[in-house]
Amino acid sequence: MYKDIFIDINLSPGESIIYEYLLKNGESPAGEIIKKTTLKRGLVYKVLSNLKEKGLIIEKKSIPSKKQGKSKISHFLPNHPEKLREFIETEKKKLDQAKNTLEATMPSIISDFNLVSGKPGVRFFEGLEGIKNVLSDSLRAKEIIYSYADLEAVVKFVDKVNKEYSEKRDNLNIKKKVIFIDSPFARNYLRNYHRKTTFMKFIDHKLYPFNSVMQIYDGKISYITLSSTSKIGVIIEDKNIYQMHKSLFEFAWLNAKAWD
């Protein structure tokens, strides 16, 4: 009855069976649980230990009769079901910690994968959440970010997301060089733009039009395409592609127009 629910909250099948048995039958010795659940003896004792450690059951030692010998007999009973909520919160915290650890080591993992496979690591993202993920990846940059951007498209389609990203980047003191499409809109928008971590130049919007964003950092290149019908992000991790785009950006930066 409850087994599937317990499995959904990250109890093992064996833990779910025994916990449900104790809920329905109350205090029971291990021997009785073995007989009634058909689980193997070794597994039952392991599961009981796990459930006890998780705070979901209680172990009681009963004083044996003379016929039973000197050893005390362990009986197990379920703790209050509210403990399930506590268990879920604990598991959630563990998962969040594991996620943070994975995110911190993901670049190294991807690098190892790329080395073994001999292929560039490519990740695709869609929608507003996808754009957030692409931008957030650069918040771990260990070097200055190089970027091309159509500011008008950014403001039109992801203004709030970009402002939140820029604020986080400033707080982390991650510097960026950006080549913007030069337009009256961009000039007006950037007139009072903070320059703490952002250095900017411009290219002619008539000669070199585009409505995307590109970022170059830490052996990666990310692309964001923005339109009224789609928002797509791509991250490519490959040292050769990265080095090519980094060199091209440095050439473009030397030839781009500085702020007047």
Image (cartoon, rainbow, N blue to C red):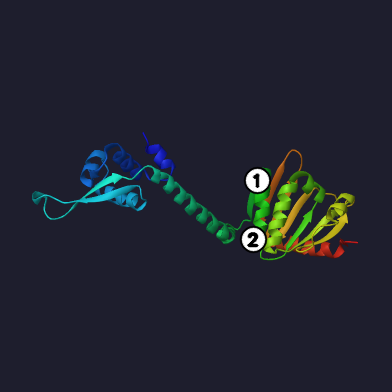
Is residue 197 visible in this depiction of the protein?
yes
Categorize mark 2 by other alpha carbons within 10 Å: few (<14), some (14-19), many (20+).
some
Determine the image quadrant of residue 17.
top left
Is residue 109 visible in this depiction of the protein?
no
Q: Secondary structure at mark 1?
A: helix
Determine the image quadrant of residue 119.
bottom right
Closer-to-camera residue (114/191): 191
Q: Are marks 1 and 2 in contact (CB under 8 Å)?
A: no
Q: How far across and how far down the image is residue 193, in percent? A: 81, 57
Q: Is residue 177 left or right of residue 64?
A: right
**Label 1 sits on what residue type?**
Glu
Query: Rounded to the nearest whole Å, what is the CA distance between mark 1 and mark 2?
Result: 18 Å
**Label 2 sits on what residue type?**
Arg
Q: How far across and how far down the image is residue 49, in percent? A: 31, 52
Q: How far across and how far down the image is residue 197, in percent? A: 75, 63
The residue positioned 27% from the left and 38% from the top of the image is 25
Closer-to-camera residue (107/24): 24
Q: Is residue 116 left or right of residue 181?
A: left
Q: Secondary structure at mark 2?
A: helix
* Residue 14 position (above or below residue 115): above
Closer-to-camera residue (185/58): 58
Task: Say whether disc 1 or disc 2 marks the residue closer to the N-terminus.
Answer: 1
The residue positioned 32% from the left and 51% from the top of the image is 52
Q: Which residue is mark 2?
A: 140
Instruction: Say the numbered circle drawn on residue 129.
Output: 1
Residue that extends furthest to the top in the rendered view of this protein: 1
